[in-house]
Image (cartoon, grey):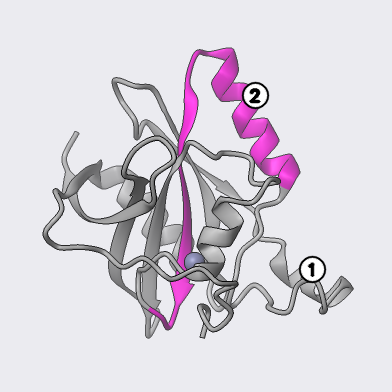
């Protein structure tokens, strides 16, 4: 299980009582395609946008967790089927291109394979670690079961310095 090692943090589930977040269908389709194509591993990547249009474009990043796990299984006890680690060159290119045109990385996405679309203790630890490149981004998690999309969750901090909250996602046409 991906959340077996919680490092003292608890996982965050989607709360149906919270308002849903609307994400354009084309972005969700890109995300689902990436998740399916990355099997049996988790995929990861970034959503670029602006304050007015938060979900303009999806950019895939390489998940290098399997490589890290092979090089140092003590530091990285899981491989890419159970965890993700975004390739830093990939995300730096996206970050710099976004900055250059006044946009920003608004969300980080990754998939779960065979477990639900929650924000795991490990995801939280990564998102809140000093070397995580986008501390202000929201997070999208898509769950894949039997090679199909099962569910998707959206995780956003409840406010400055607050904990993440899990929202359901609905697709919009625009
Ligand atoms: Zn995760």
Would residue 51 appear left or right of 125 to someone viewing this image? left
Tell me the residue at 61%/33% (across/down): 94
Tell me: residue 125, above or below residue 128: below
Q: Is mark 1 within 8 Å of ligand 1?
A: no
Image mark for residue 67:
1
Query: Which residue is under mark 2?
Result: 96
Using the numbered discs, state the Cα–Cα distance from disc 1 to disc 2 in whole angstroms. Answer: 25 Å
- Where residue 133 sits, quadrant-wise, is top right
Q: Which element carries disc 1, helix, strand or loop?
A: helix
Residue 88, given in percent of the width and then of the height, sits at 73, 45
Residue 118, given in percent of the width and then of the height, sits at 37, 68
Tell me the residue at 35%/46% (across/down): 156
Q: Which residues are magenta?
A: 88-115
Q: Is residue 116 visible?
A: yes
- Where residue 97 sits, quadrant-wise, is top right
> Label 2 crowding class (10 Å Cα cut-off): few <14, some 14-19, many 20+?
some
């Amino acid at each position: 299980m991906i959340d077996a090692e919680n490092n003292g943090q608890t996982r965050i589930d989607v709360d149906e009582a919270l308002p849903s977040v609307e994400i354009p269908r084309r972005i969700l389709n890109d995300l689902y395609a990436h998740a399916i194509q990355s099997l049996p591993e988790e995929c990861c990547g970034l959503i670029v946008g602006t304050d007015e249009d938060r979900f303009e474009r999806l950019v895939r990043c390489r998940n290098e967790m399997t490589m890290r796990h092979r090089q140092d299984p003590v530091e990285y006890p899981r491989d890419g089927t159970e965890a993700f680690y975004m390739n830093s060159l990939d995300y730096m290119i996206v970050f710099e291109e976004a900055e250059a045109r006044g946009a920003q990385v608004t969300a980080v996405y990754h998939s779960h394979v065979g477990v639900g679309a929650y924000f795991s203790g490990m995801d939280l630890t990564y998102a809140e670690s000093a070397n995580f490149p986008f501390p202000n981004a929201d997070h999208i998690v898509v769950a894949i079961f039997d090679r199909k999309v099962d569910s998707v969750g959206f995780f956003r901090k409840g406010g400055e310095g607050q904990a993440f909250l899990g929202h359901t996602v609905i697709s919009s046409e625009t």
